[in-house]
Image (cartoon, rainbow, N blue to C red):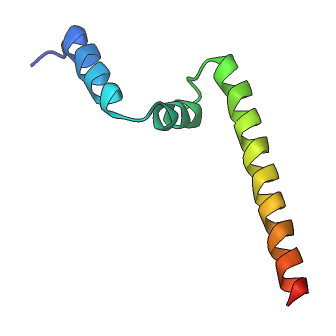
């Protein structure tokens, strides 16, 4: 059976429509096929997550000191 490109594209679209956009972007990033803009977005998301974790860690440390 010869691969049908149209069927492959339709199957890919169907699968991607069922996934969260973030998951698709992460997968594309891992195989280096994501658009450059997405790489910038990931850098911003990564930085925001680090900041959020740092703030939560600081808050937890402050609460522990109060004990």
Image coordinates of residue 22 in percent, x first then y, are 52, 35
Q: Does 11 appear above or below 25?
A: above
Quarter placement of the C terminus: bottom right
Q: Nearer the viewer, residue 45 or 61?
A: 61
Q: Residue at x 30, y 19 (%)?
A: 13
Query: Does residue 54 appear to the left or right of 20 in the view shown?
Result: right
Q: Does 44 appear above or below 34?
A: below
Image coordinates of residue 9 in percent, x first then y, are 28, 15
Q: Residue at x 55, y 23 (%)?
A: 33
Residue furthest bottom as drawn = 67
Can you tell which quarter of the image residue 37 is in? top right
Q: Nearer the viewer, residue 22 or 67?
A: 67
Q: Residue at x 30, y 23 (%)?
A: 12
Quarter placement of the N terminus: top left
Residue furthest front as drawn = 66
Can you tell which quarter of the image residue 6 is in? top left
Q: Does 51 appear above or below 2?
A: below
Image coordinates of residue 31 in percent, x first then y, are 54, 33
Can you tell which quarter of the image residue 66 is in? bottom right
Residue furthest top as drawn = 6
Query: Does residue 2 appear to the left or right of 33 in the view shown?
Result: left
Give the number of callouts: 0
């Amino acid at each position: 059976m010869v691969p049908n490109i149209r069927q492959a594209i339709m199957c890919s679209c169907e699968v991607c429509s069922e996934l969260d956009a973030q998951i698709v972007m992460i997968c594309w990033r891992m195989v280096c096929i994501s658009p450059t803009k997405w790489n910038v977005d990931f850098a911003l998301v990564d930085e925001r997550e680090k900041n959020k974790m740092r703030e939560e860690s600081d808050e937890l440390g402050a609460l522990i000191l109060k004990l």
